[in-house]
Amino acid sequence: MKRRQFLHTGSLVSLPVLFGGLELSAITRSALFGMVNNGDDRVLVLIQLNGGNDGLNMVIPLDQYTGLNQVRPNLVLPESKVLKLRDKTGLHPSMTGLHTLYQEEKMAVVQSVGYPNQNRSHFRSTDIWSSASEADEFLATGWVGRYLDQKYPGFPEAYPNADCPDPFAITIGGVVSETCQGLVSNFSFALTSKTSARLVEETVAAQPDGSCYSNEVEYIRTTIKQSNAYATNVLEAFDKGANMATYPDNNNLANQLKLVANLISGGLGTKIYVVNIGGFDTHANQVLIGEPENGDHATLLKNLSDAIAAFTADCAALGIQERVVGMTFSEFGRQIRANNSFGTDHGTAAPLLVFGSCVNHGIYGDNPEITSDIEPQEGVPMQHDFRSVYASLLIDWLGASESDVRNILFDDF
């Protein structure tokens, strides 16, 4: 699907679908979204579902139950337990938090998101989603990294500075996200907890003498100084910020999002946060025998739903809800037919969720058609190219221009 269909047919300043309001040519974006400064303090939170999420078990096509019972007899949920979003579509029964969010008009579902010529390798498909490349194209930069490179050319030299004192992106975890990889350096600051934002001891620099590796050593010293400068501001934001909602126990994603809310409320100017939840490679034991509403996938979806619900409530209580939009994504969906291990194998497209008080709630796209004659390894057909979703986020939320997005993503979006 082209982005212009996402944003209604017409000019490039037509009414946004994912982010609602008045015509962009009539008013400024700050008036469109409220409590923001021309996009300068808007935040995007990316939630990566590692392993390949079974979208047919998350967003349920209620009008396809005849086909589902034929191709997924051991996995199909009792229809009476599905949480209805509308007559033909519902959510897994474990996702009560996101069901409430949808009813409050703070969530959108984008159906069957993927890319042409799907690669079913975890590593390669993750690379494609991170870089926003074609399936047969290999890029060394991430889509967020290219966006930030255009806004802040020359990074990391001369950063941080008085105008940009904070990390441009933060990955909650021990490794920076490939999504934020720029031309020269990764824009993301890795963080696991408040205590992990500790300062690194700086060595005393010797005079450059042109000896072997002297340039490389100087680069390391510069990197340490930059990291320490960012860490100082991160620690200050932790101290100034707070959490006002109750987060679920034993939920790692909730812990990550709790950190994000704390930092945003503490005044940190970071634009992009990347968090993740693993375990979605459900080849076996996706459901319990005889209890399809329970099992590994149900637990994952509950953790996802509960974490986002708590984070959204926290943002509202902290008064930052109109600054924050989040999106889930996974490297691929699962095959339509169940396997013989009460699970599913690597597939193609899957739905993703966009959430926040500034999101135009609804379901974008149609339910996939499920029939009994589906081929054994067939996946859900793509309706929306994932880069069209990225384009909507970049233009309508982060304020990128059309020409920027054509350079960052692809010419024909």
Image: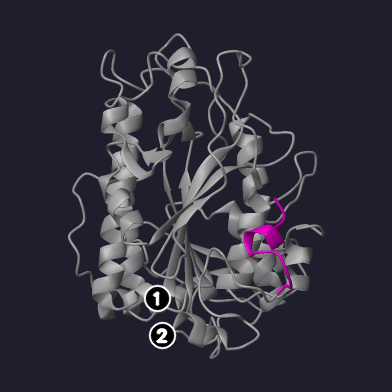
Residue 358: where, in percent of width, then height?
A: 44, 70
Residue 147: where, in percent of width, then height?
A: 67, 68
Callout 1–callout 2 Cβ contact below 8 Å? yes
Protein image colouring: one colour
Q: Say which residue label 2 marks.
A: 35
Asked whether the viewer can see residue 274, the reply is no
Mark 2 Cα-neighbour bin, 10 Å: few <14, some 14–19, many ≥20: some
Residue plotted at (38% across, 40% down): 90
Asked whether 355 or 207 is in front, the reply is 355
Q: Residue 64 has which mark?
A: none
Quadrant, the C terminus:
bottom right
Q: Is residue 311 above or below residue 32?
A: above
Asked whether 192 or 104 is in front, the reply is 104
Asked whether 161 or 120 is in front, the reply is 120
Drawn side of residue 11 relative to residue 377, left or right = right
Q: Main secondary structure of the magenta part?
A: loop
Residue plotted at (58% across, 76% down): 205
Residue 258 colored in magenta in the image: no
Asked whether the viewer can see residue 411, the reply is yes
Residue type for callout 1: Glu
Residue 345: where, in percent of width, then height?
A: 53, 21
Q: Is residue 309 above or below residue 243?
A: above
Residue plotted at (75% across, 50% down): 139
Marks 1 and 2 sit apart, C-alpha to C-alpha, by: 6 Å
Residue 9 colored in magenta in the image: yes
Q: How many marks?
A: 2
Q: Residue 322 has which mark?
A: 1
Quarter of the image for residue 317 reads bottom left
Drawn side of residue 111 relative to residue 49, left or right = right
Give the mark nearer the N terminus: 1 vs 2.
2
SS at badge 2: loop
Q: Which residues are magenta?
A: 1-12
